[in-house]
Amino acid sequence: MPKRVDHDQRRREIAAALCRLAGERGLEGVSLSEVAAAAGMSKGLVQHYFRNKDLMLRYATGYLRERLEQRVADRTAAATSQPRELLRAVLLALLPLDRDDRTESLVATAFLFRALQDPAVAERFREGRTLLRTALITWIEATYPSGRVAPVQEADMLLALVSGLGDAVLLGYHTPEQATAILDRQLERLDAASAAQPG
């Protein structure tokens, strides 16, 4: 019998190879031939799935989103079921705290620059951020039901905070431990605001 091929898995393997290379030297210098070699495939097979580099890059944005969703799922599964700990786990999943996180953050940054020139990639970024913001609003509402914390504004603040902290860790301004401590201080401020007695 002929061997059955999992085409989705092949595409993910190609995207993973692209991301490994892009994490080392950015997107622009990566060729289809290099991706094929890194994926252990022929260039012709890669072109069977992606006619050109642009299509491969656009697919890879979805792969990165899947990786982020899996990281969030893993971190929340390891946390307690308390809403505050789940919110913290989600936010920590957005930071480059270990080598794999760092690689994916570097690739996401490379895609951000690509998005400035590629409307399709830019739209994928906007979709992803909207989904993340909506989820954060829900987690904040569950964590701080007192009504003394504004979920929409705090979601925007926390997203801006983790984005800035992520850049600071990548550039070596902060260690992962320092970034975690800064995030924890912000959550403690939210805890205090939620618990404050109305004046």
Image: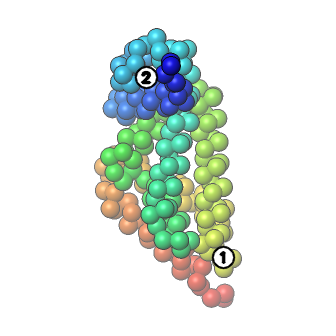
Residue at image x 50%, y 14%?
A: 47
Q: Answer left or right for 9 relative to 154.
A: left
List x then y, in percent, for residue 189. 51, 74
Q: Residues within 10 Å of mark 2 (few under 14, many from 20)?
A: few
Give residue 145's mark: 1
Pick out the residue farthest to the right. Answer: 147
| Residue type of the residue flagged with mark 2 | Glu
As rendered, which of 172 and 176 lies closer to the eye? 176
Q: Which quadrant of the view contains residue 148? A: bottom right
Whole-percent x, y for residue 67 in the image: 49, 44
Residue 72 seen by the camera: yes
Task: Name the residue beneath numbered marker 2.
Answer: 28
Q: Where is residue 57 in the image (x, y as percent from the top left)?
A: 52, 26
Q: Which of marks 1 and 2 is in front?
A: 1
| Residue 53 visible in the displayed image | no
Could you tell me which quadrant the C terminus lies in? Answer: bottom right
Instruction: Give the residue drawn at x 63%, y 41%.
Output: 126
Give the secondary structure at mark 2. loop
Between residues 152 and 99, which one lies in front from this camera angle?
99
